[in-house]
Amino acid sequence: MEKDQLSRKLAVILHADVVGSTSLVQKNEAIAHKRIQAAFHQFSETIRSYGGIAREIRGDALVAEFERASDAVAAALAFQVSNVELNTAIEDDVQPQVRIGISLGEVIVADNTVTGTGVVLAQRLEQLAGPGGVVVQGSVSETVPTRMPFEFEYLGERDLKGFDKPVRAFSASLQEGKTLPAPEVSSTPQSRDPVNLKVADKPSIAVLPFDNLSGDPSQQYLVDAITEDLVSNMAHDLWFDVIARASTQKFKDDKAGTANIAAELGARYIVDGSLRKAGDRIRVSVMLIDGNDGRQIWDQRFDRVATDLFELQDEIAISIAAAVIPEVNTAEQRSAIRRHPQNLDAWSYCHKAFWHLYTFELSQLELSQSLFEQAIEHDPSYSQPYAGLAYSQMMTLWYDSSKQALLETASQNAHHAIQLDNRDSWAHFALGRILSMQCQYDEATLELERAIELNPSFGRAYFGLASVAVYSANYAQALEPIDTAIRLSPADPHLWTFYNIKARALTGLEQYEEAEHWARKAVRQPSATFWCDLALVSALGYLGREDEARLAIQELYRKKPGYSLEQYTRDDFVLAPAAHQLVIEGLRKAGLPERTKPPR
């Protein structure tokens, strides 16, 4: 690298790593990697909100740069608070805990990589911190204004590897009874007009023209068609604004500097991709990029066999939209979950509420309802908090069937969301699910079909259609929509319910071996509830596998001690008589008792 390409400067450096990452990976490599990356992506959002730059994420470590020590300390403490909240929602022990070190020193910046003495010192300080802790250099603590609500506990002069002289180290924490300072809004001319802040908080996304890597200019029409269809499909989703293709077309032959493109377009996220055709096979590669710093958030390949090209371009565009939209929503939820209440507007409250909803725990569902209500207080004309509130209230009944009064309230909220915005696919989806629980199967089907019409990539709406078919004992009608749901939303936080519905449909079709397979996939999902165990027990009952059924019942009892056919009849109130009898008979064959035995 040429010398004049290097940039030397004095900077505040933050270094963070995951405590015991090797142990986490040994417990479950896939989950550990996913959660570590999620934690660091959230930390990157926090860093940016406090004016920092997340320079690198290297496996289980992160390096960031700040201009002010106070911003670095605030970002570190804010992240640690939110990370505790995130870990609390995790039921297993694969919980990434982070330790952080902050230094002030000279660094070298090149190609978005930062190196130098300041980075090494921050890393050494971080090694002095415990899980969830923050340790700073003495000069950092001295630079922070006394008005800041931070407390610095002296840890003494420490001999650190690679440094000739001892370094004064301090443990940083928030003063008791104080709240973390919010990120400061810039007062420079470039800052947004305050009256537009609420609108600007809704993210925008730009789809750049995909590249044709086939070496065949005649394939350019297919590349352009997929790009255009993707823009159209993503525009159906109301969670963000999609920048018109006419505005992105100018970057077709020049994509250098993604962050600069995002800034020019006013986009928070960029979607870029390419198409390669070889023989009758087509591969489309897509990535989602953070517009602030050019960091890649997600990438995926879509491999298809070229048959009917018009059908193929529709399928690829819908599949990409179905994959990208949840990634954007997840990024927004992580951003909202770590923000302080005084900085939340209706949009942020709504995303924070959905984060809690997707844990699918009763206490978290109740918290999500409170947050949706606060979003409504901020903006009563905003349809999506009403839709989210309705869905969360409906979900509560799957965990506590005694709260039947919530169903009517949920119905009112879903109808109100549709009155506010008849093109809100989430509102139609929520109403469809509520109607299915009220055994109004035909009306539910119409609402769910409307949700799909409005948003063809809405995987969960296809799941809703399959559910109605199962509830009404029309099992064959469930297979196509549930397979579509699984294809469109393979990482859905609600995936166990997809597998569960497929298992129940296959049981109804007397395909018991396949039903057992999908029920076992369901129970293995991290957030799976006792409903999946019931599907497995029922399938094993029909298969006549008494020993396996007995073990499955024992697993059911771990979640629902002493569960009986009598309790199932109370809980599963959504089924038509034929569908109800099908499950009951399988559970009875498996040996589930008729009634719960009274305690001795």
Image (spheres, rainbow, N blue to C red):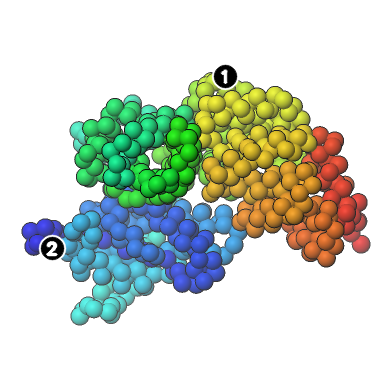
* Image position, residue 38 (x, y; %): 44, 54
Disc 2 vs disc 1: which is toward the camera? 2
Q: In the visual, does 188 lie left or right of 494? A: left
Q: Give the residue number, with chain letter if any, for mark 1.
A: 419
Q: In the visual, does 142 lie left or right of 518? A: left
Q: In the rendered image of this protein, does residue 540 appear above or below residue 214?
A: below
Q: Name the one closer to the observer, 74 or 151.
A: 74
Residue sitting at 28 percent across and 67 percent down?
Answer: 122
- Most extreme residue toward the top is 419
Amino acid beneath label 2:
Met
* Image position, residue 292 (x, y; %): 29, 44
- Disc 2, SS: loop
Q: Give the residue number, with chain letter if any, for mark 2.
A: 1
Marks 2/1: CA distance?
A: 61 Å
Q: Name the one closer to the observer, 26 or 167.
A: 26
Q: Name the one closer to the observer, 34 or 134.
A: 34
- Most extreme residue toward the front is 279
